[in-house]
Image (cartoon, helix red, strand yellow):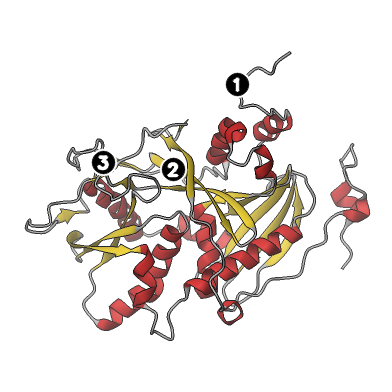
Amino acid sequence: MEPRRTKRGAGKTEVAEPRNKLPRPAPSLPTDPALYSGPFPFYRRPSELGCFSLDAQRQYHGDARALRYYSPPPTNGPGPNFDLRDGYPDRYQPRDEEVQERLDHLLCWLLEHRGQLEGGPGWLAGAIVTWRGHLTKLLTTPYEQQEGWQLAASRFQGTLYLSEVETPAARAQRLARPPLLRELMYMGYKFEQYMCADKPGSSPDPSGEVNTNVAFCSVLRSRLGSHPLLFSGEVDCTDPQAPSTQPPTCYVELKTSKEMHSPGQWRSFYRHKLLKWWAQSFLPGVPNVVAGFRNPEGFVSSLKTFPTMEMFEYVRNDRDGWNPSVCMNFCAAFLSFAQSTVVHDDPRLVHLFSWEPGGPVTVSVHRDAPYAFLPIWYVEAMTQDLPSPPKTPSPK
């Protein structure tokens, strides 16, 4: 199929590339798990480059002010008995999900630190920059049967940026979210309030407001196969008692799940929920997920720690289970697919990768709004090409 040249080239005063060179949609990428079995690919141990915080108004701060400290109840006590419904809805400030933040907070961090990147600013030119959550979706794709996704990709100064686009189905689902599901979301955040303190050694205070605008984010560097990665993800808390205080090995992920009473329920939990927990924690190198199991009344009655590196053991002998190698091999294949598809260096050009369960990943090409996601302030600041860190005047 011939690309429509005239329309896409219209309105462009400077001709950055010949019109007949406008990218054609690439072939598709299959997602069948059988295609990705094989040895586990190389994955560099993630190292933390820095962090940032978002406050109660969702404002960015380039520091760790929002970091909380793991403070579980004593193991010799009567059990947790946390009321996860407490404070709902009157002490709840949920984040405005209509605001599309894209990569903006991560780009703020990148602008502040581009001059101090390990490997030099040139390292960024070959890297992929994204959120941990986007990579998590890629890892779980071969086994996902419910929810599709869309990832927008743009290349700028050599770097490939990936930013999720809310699918029409996901948007419809969000807007029609039933009250019970809204309450379940609250309960997950409430559990964190019972398990975390504001200072090391102090006790949790569950009497305050649950405000989901507040977030502490770690910025990490890794490499999957031949793909250098720079990504950021939200961290629930750090464990002051961890064997190593070196992030990310001191971080803890907190989750809630309903109580399980039968082998079938546990099997389903291991196949579906544990896969997502593994993908989310393995990528940034978070060693443990602590789960609170809640009863139908919304009380957490027991806690269980799932070490990230042991999660696969629960499904190793389940023929309907998942395999970490398949997840990582597919993610590596997608990154190669994206790198070879998005060849034009232009922050206003977007390749939209779309996937629905049961089908392959497909690509469409767009220019400018509404898909372009790299903000003008970022593009302009990076184009000024400071070899030194920002805010440092260049020598005359």
Foreground of the two, 189 or 277:
277
Task: Give me the disc on residue 265.
Answer: none
Task: Give me the disc on residue 391.
Answer: 1
Amino acid carrying mark 2 in the image:
Cys
Assign a secondary structure to mark 1. loop
Residue ID at (19%, 40%)? 207
Residue 194 position within the rendered picture, expressed as x and y whole percent measured from the top left: 21, 48
Residue indicated by mark 2: 217
Residue ID at (65%, 34%)? 378
Q: How many marks?
A: 3
Residue 230 position within the rendered picture, expressed as x and y whole percent measured from the top left: 57, 48
Pick whichever of labels 1 and 2 is earlier in the sequence: 2
Q: Is residue 166 visible?
A: no
Residue indicated by mark 3: 91
Q: Quadrant of residue 313?
A: bottom left
Foreground of the two, 62 or 147:
62
Amino acid carrying mark 1 in the image:
Lys
Give the distance between the C-alpha atoms of the residues marked 1 and 2, in whole angstroms: 23 Å
